[in-house]
Amino acid sequence: MCLDQALQEGPPEIIREGCPQPFRHTLSRQGLKLERGRTTTLQINVGLLCNQACRHCHLSAGPGRGENMDAATAEEVIAYAKRSDFEVIDITGGAPELNPNLARLIHGLSPFSQRLMFRSNLVALNDGTREDLFQLLQAHKAVIVASFPSLNEDQADSQRGKGVFRASIDALKKLNAIGYGQNGSGLELNLVSNPTGAFLPSSQKQMETRFRQVLQQKVGIVFNNFFAFANVPLGRFRQWLIQSGNLETYLSKLVSSFNSCAVEGLMCRTLISVSWDGYFYDCDFNLARDLPMGGRKVHVAEMKGPPPPGSPISVADHCYTCTAGAGFT
């Protein structure tokens, strides 16, 4: 199969036990079609190595994972960004701080993006050995998207590990001290919260108001934007749902919360995700599910530029997460 054909033909939807309604059927019943618009964002998953083993992780990332982007693949990704003219470049993991080629990626990618994003669990950033990374992110005005699951210390530590809450607070204070989250600094700090159990998040607006008030009043922390996202039923979180007997109930919640208005703004319509080994997916969740873009593994070295508008997007039951309630971006 030639590359162009692979990009035009999506694979059949993979249906897992427990899902009450295939996602593609729901789209069809609503008269909706999910396909690419103009691809403006390159997301780079630099590996599954992480300092934490969070219960909600869709990638099952952790300290024992060996998948990590090597130097040769990092250079291929930089070359691809140079020839593709993306508006946004988004670096994620695992914990991207643990990739030895991270500094090279930031230096190499920054000139080819209007907006460079860096996703962090905060603890890996704040382990006492990465002061140079704080400075590097500041110098390139990278937008930091920080995972901060709860204002409750016990809940946060339960989801992500003992001591995580206090280490995260300390990291946020350091980021504020160098300008992140401060008005007029040009250094954007965004927080992301995921529920700690088998339920959907509360109203994002209400949660943002509470997080702002509590963090600023109690510890003097400020930030720019707040996002509340549902957990994706993949990886370690899916295993926990199965073991706890919550899988079918959780999937039913996602299906019943389907919001047709969220489809137009789905990130997979404008984003392409490249994995630590250089292969393309429609999003990081499809990467976790091993559903390659176009149904065929295409390496970054093969791609001349972004996939064309109108290309189909691979879907499965986890896609309901991104269309539940306010959606996922």
Image: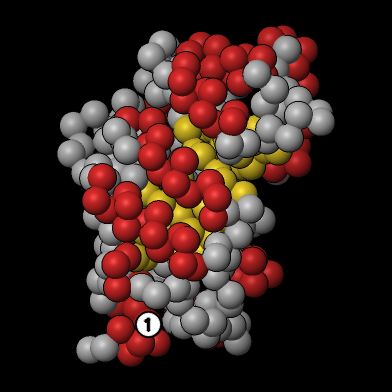
Q: Is residue 141 visible?
A: yes
Quarter of the image for the N terminus: give it.
bottom left
Picture quadrant where residue 281 is located: bottom left
Residue ID for mark 1: 7
Position of residue 21 measured from the top left corner of the image (x, y, whole percent): 43, 73
Residue reaching furthest to the right: 184
**Residue drawn at the location 46% of the way across and 55% of the way down:** 43
Position of residue 71 measured from the top left corner of the image (x, y, whole percent): 26, 45
149 and 104: which is toward the camera: 104
**Residue drawn at the location 23% of the way across and 45% of the way down:** 70
Image vertical order of residue 63 relative to residue 304, above or below: above
Image vertical order of residue 103 relative to residue 21, above or below: above
**Residue drawn at the location 52% of the way across and 23% of the way down:** 134
Q: How many marks?
A: 1
Position of residue 5 measured from the top left corner of the image (x, y, whole percent): 33, 89
Q: Is residue 240 visible?
A: no
Residue 245 relative to residue 131: left or right: left
**Residue drawn at the location 34% of the way across and 78% of the way down:** 294
21 and 73: which is toward the camera: 73
Position of residue 168 measured from the top left corner of the image (x, y, whole percent): 52, 18
195 and 115: which is toward the camera: 115
Q: How is the image coloured?
A: secondary structure
